[in-house]
Image: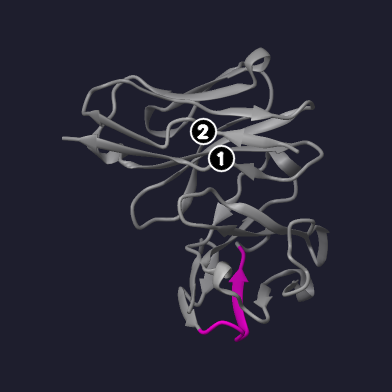
Amino acid sequence: EAGVVQSPRYKIIEKKQPVAFWCNPISGHNTLYWYRQNLGQGPELLIRYENEEAVDDSQLPKDRFSAERLKGVDSTLKIQPAELGDSAVYLCASSSAAGGPRETQYFGPGTRLLVL
Amino acid sequence: AQSVSQHNHHVILSEAASLELGCNYSYGGTVNLFWYVQYPGQHLQLLLKYFSGDPLVKGIKGFEAEFIKSKFSFNLRKPSVQWSDTAEYFCAVIPNAGKSTFGDGTTLTVKP
């Protein structure tokens, strides 16, 4: 079974440019998470989807970040415009909705973003 | 606000030494507790988890963790580490009615 797929794996952009990350979760997983991981820190939740619905986006900086999960499968996270402080690894994870918060999250390889 | 604290940022051990990594959290309600591991060049993956029952849980590769409710702790242990255990370890707390919170991780280096 394929794991969580993310692309691109690496991205280098100049500040003020837009950037988008794509995630395809494990087949059948209704819950999808986007995390940001800064160097030397743990993953920080940005947004959680249950199917198409964003059920927790309190940590998403909505002035520049946006996310969507059309059709409840793959998802896109966008930053516009990017700032130097956005340099980080952006992780996508998915889980089955059956057990709710008890479910194991399966992580993708992440997208490493560098903003110059 | 809920938080997770991993006190050891970097631990260096020799093979066969015993391991204990600390994890403390702050949250007043019911929580689900996880340890994830990231081996060099690999994705984050689950080591073990606890949500109810026996507070001593066993995971993969000989790891175990003990939930002590009175101390808000969920420490990870392994009696004898191997070189292949070199990795970064993250504790995570997910309340029944709240968001996922991860600690900042502990880097374990095992010397052969």
Q: Does residue A88 appear in the picture of this structure?
A: yes
From the viewer's perspective, tell me whether residue B79 is left or right of residue B53: left
Q: Nearer the viewer, residue A85 or B4?
A: A85
Which image quadrant: the C terminus of chain B? top left
Q: Is residue A17 magenta?
A: yes
Rendering coords of residue A89 (x, y %): 51, 64
> Which element type, helix, strand or loop, lies under badge 2?
loop
**Residue at 62% from the left image edge and 52% from the top image edge:** A44
Q: Earlier in the sequence, mark 1 or mark 2?
A: 2
Rendering coords of residue A23 (x, y %): 60, 70
From the viewer's perspective, tell me whether residue B18 is left or right of residue A63: left
Numbered marks: total: 2
Please tell me how crowded label 2 is: few (under 14), some (14-19), or many (20+) other residues with Cα within 10 Å. many
The amino acid type found where label 1 is placed reads Gly
**Residue at 64% from the left image edge and 29% from the top image edge:** B25
Q: Which residue is mark 1?
A: B103
Label 1, label 2: how many angstroms apart (C-alpha)? 6 Å
Q: Which residue is mark 2?
A: B6
Q: Are marks 1 and 2 in contact (CB under 8 Å)?
A: yes
> Which element type, helix, strand or loop, lies under badge 1?
loop
Q: Is residue A65 above or below residue A50?
A: below
Q: Is residue A9 magenta?
A: no
From the viewer's perspective, tell me whether residue A38 is left or right of residue A53: left
Q: Nearer the viewer, residue B28 or B94?
A: B28
Chain bearing tag 2 is B
Chain bearing tag 1 is B
Looking at the rendering, the stretch of residues picked out in magenta corresponds to A14-25
